[in-house]
Amino acid sequence: MNKKLFLLELNEFNINILKYYSKKYNLTNIQKILKFNKTNTYTNDRYIGDNNQFGYLDPWSQWVSIHTQTPAKVHKIKNLGDIPSLKLKQIWEKRKKDFYIWGPMNASKRNSKNVKVFFPDPWVYSEKAHPIKLNNILMPIKKITKSRGKLSNKKKLILIAKLIKNLKSYLSIKDLNNFFINLLKGYFKFGNKNLVQIVAWEDLSFRIFTNFFKKKDSFFAIFFLNSLAHVQHHYWQKKNDSNEIIFCLRKIDSIIDYLIKIKNIELIIFNGLSQTNVEDDKLYLYEQISHEEFLNSIGIKFKRIEKLMTNDAFIFFNTSKDKKKCANLLNKVRFKSKKIFFVETKKDNKLFYKTNYIKKVSKNDKLIINKKKITFLKYFQLITLRRGVHSHNGEILSQKKYFPKRIPNHKFFNYI
């Protein structure tokens, strides 16, 4: 293994999208990585139940498999935010190598002294950044990300101002200016779509991250990119090119260009799992407008809510009695005669729940709980028509030939 190894965890990329768009839009650096050694990966996990409520074929489970070198049926981490329950060691806890890690899906630094930099996935409440000063960046990002739709413009501006103040310690004026230019270009083209902030933030994160190690003689760097997975889920069309995918891939192309120019670095790109297009299936994804307002409306007492990435959340309670009552109530909620929530009780007065209805909802459709009728769209909103869903197959693109032609994804680190 090269003394300078960079693993780009390009989450869920569909390789045909990379091939098609890089050729048509002259994305030369993506074309370069497509000429790397290619290995096919797979997992035995599959979608089970509506929205995969019983399965492990989600990135927050599959990346745990990869980082621990164990299949999901062994580590049993199924939900985003379950990482404190992980009993197995992750690769950076096993190897005596200087690790620099940014944004890993559902991962934890824990007490690993090998990890020199760790910036966690902002969606995981439990994790802190290392060195500690990086939490000055992490905390505003967490609040902005997890308070989607609930922050006033004034509070959002205050958080952004704090973020900018702290970013000045890590970035040049040129990098900060480019960040704002990217935001403005995105807003001008797409309006206030989430992809604009995601793409700009990932590019900025990458600039911060590389400054920690690019002058080091030896390192193992891991950088997680989720923007392409997001735009595939939301904007992948069979018949038309997607401006959102083009916008995202141009930025990824520039990131790869920067990486290739770092002296003596070796690059591996891995998607962990991929996506397939299901545009014709008409899968509609809905989320709670406010978890708090919905739970209050059906009489549930709770201590606090930890919103997760889409239509799921952890609910915390003061007593086990309140948790049990909540689970019973949520399990009774029906929509068009079907159970609408997947509910899973946890330890420490904690409960996980997820909305599982994936068909189109009409204006006057009602939820029913204990004979009480509630208008669905009063408390829920459409996120997207889901166009890409998770596939059990994936790909590795590596400059050197480490891997055989096909491996289980959890054996990735067995070869490097």
Image (cartoon, helix red, strand yellow):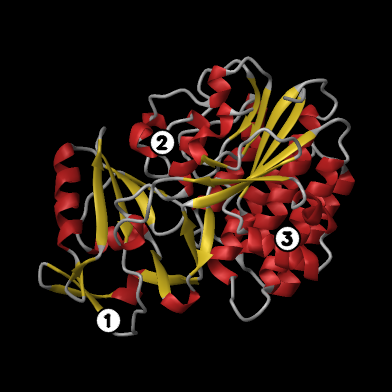
The one nearer the camera, 93 or 73, is 73
Q: Nearer the viewer, mark 1 or mark 2?
A: 2
In the shown orientation, is residue 208 left or right of residue 323? right
Q: Give the quadrant of the C terminus.
A: top right
**Circle 2 SS class:** loop
In the shown orientation, is residue 224 left or right of residue 380? right
Q: Quadrant of residue 232?
A: bottom right
Q: Nearer the viewer, mark 2 or mark 3?
A: 2
Q: CA distance from mark 2 to mark 3?
A: 30 Å
**Disc with the residue nearer the chain's start (1 vs 2):** 2
Image location of residue 21, percent across then percent down:
73, 67
The answer to the question of whether label 1 and label 3 lie on touching residues, with beta carbons closer than 8 A, is: no
At label 3, counting other C-alpha atoms closer than 10 Å, the crowd grade (few under 14, some 14-19, many 20 or more) is many
In the shown orientation, is residue 281 left or right of residue 365? right
Query: Residue sitting at 18 percent across and 50 percent down?
Result: 327
Q: CA distance from mark 1 to mark 2?
A: 40 Å
Q: Which residue is mark 3?
A: 249
Which amino acid is tagged 2? Pro
The disc placed on residue 365 is: 1
The one nearer the camera, 406 or 212, is 406
**Circle 3 SS class:** helix
How many labels were placed on the picture? Answer: 3
354 shown above or below 85: below
**Circle 1 SS class:** loop
The answer to the question of whether label 1 and label 2 lie on touching residues, with beta carbons closer than 8 A, is: no
Q: Which residue is mark 2?
A: 71
Query: Residue sitting at 75 percent across and 46 percent down?
Result: 36
Which amino acid is tagged 3? Leu
The one nearer the camera, 46 or 207, is 46
